[in-house]
Image (tube, rainbow, N blue to C red):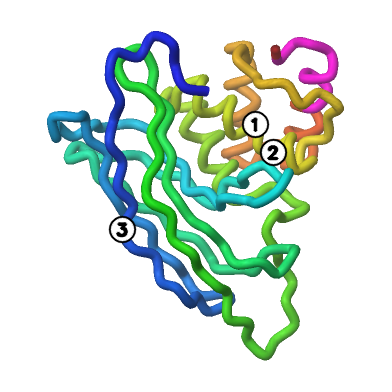
Amino acid sequence: MSSVYATSYANIHLDIVGGVLVEDSSVAFSGKLTAPDGTPISNRTVFIEDDAQYTRPDIIIALAKTDSDGKFYASWKAVPKDNGAPFHLYAEFFGGKQFGFTRSETYESVIKLNNQTTHEVVPSKTVPSWFLYASKLWHDGKMRDLDYAYGVENMVDYQIIKSNNTSDFTTIPFWIRYDAGLLSDGKISTDEYTEMLGYLINNGIIK
């Protein structure tokens, strides 16, 4: 999804993520996004993802917004992958007319299971917290359509949003922001919102 309009590439750095993560512990992600000359890039969305292997698409773990210094912070509750494999975590940024796509270093992390029965895995069968956060940001005008569309694609890739259409999404109607706001305010359920998105994708309204 790198932009054909970009004139230069950004630089993104993800701080080291521990090699062994304890299940259900809080994992802190941090890093910095800058222009090639070192100038901070502020108010942009950064995705923290797992570099999935073989034919599986990468899956979003968390997302963050850069501050005025280009720094970003995100947290995640460590849960194992559904296939038991280690994570290969990295940060990703989609540019635009000024900056192109960039990706950070990758860190391998293994989830150390606790003695309790695991109730959650990645990918989840339910709407992850990062998507609720993204919906609020998008509704409030603090996330670009490009970034939100990427999040929707990822939800479709793992069938959290049910759809037979796996094409890249580039156009999301503006009026859907209203429903995203209802979701973030708890006025409609995640099931209602994802079913609506699936319907709109299948019928070509989200293109």
Element at label 3: loop
Badge 2 crowding class, 10 Å Cα cut-off, few under 14, some 14 to 19, many 20 or more, is many
Q: CA distance from mark 1 to mark 2?
A: 5 Å
Badge 1 crowding class, 10 Å Cα cut-off, few under 14, some 14 to 19, many 20 or more, is many
Q: Residue at x 52, y 37 (%)?
A: 134
Residue 20 position in % (x across, y down): 48, 77
| Residue type at numbered disc 1 | Val
Element at label 1: helix
Element at label 2: helix
**Mark earlier in primary sequence (1, 3):** 3
| Residue type at numbered disc 3 | Asp
- Name the image quarter holding residue 131: top right
Q: Quadrant of the C terminus?
A: top right
Which numbered disc, 1 or 3, marks the residue closer to the eye? 3
| Residue type at numbered disc 2 | Met
Task: Identify the residue at the far bottom of this view.
Answer: 115
| Residue identified by numbered label 2 | 155
Q: Residue at x 30, y 15 (%)?
A: 98
Residue 15 position in % (x across, y down): 31, 58
Residue 48 position in % (x across, y down): 47, 48
Which numbered disc, 3 or 2, marks the residue closer to the eye? 3
- Front residue of 197/89: it is 89
Instruction: For the residues labelled 3 and 2, say whether their Cβ atoms are less than 8 Å apart.
Output: no
| Residue identified by numbered label 3 | 15
| Residue identified by numbered label 1 | 152
Instruction: For the residues labelled 1 and 2, say whether their Cβ atoms are less than 8 Å apart.
Output: yes
Q: CA distance from mark 1 to mark 3?
A: 26 Å
- The answer to if 176 sits in the magenta stretch is no
Q: Residue at x 37, y 51 (%)?
A: 105
Span shown in magenta: 198-206
- Is residue 202 found left or right of 32 in the rendered image? right
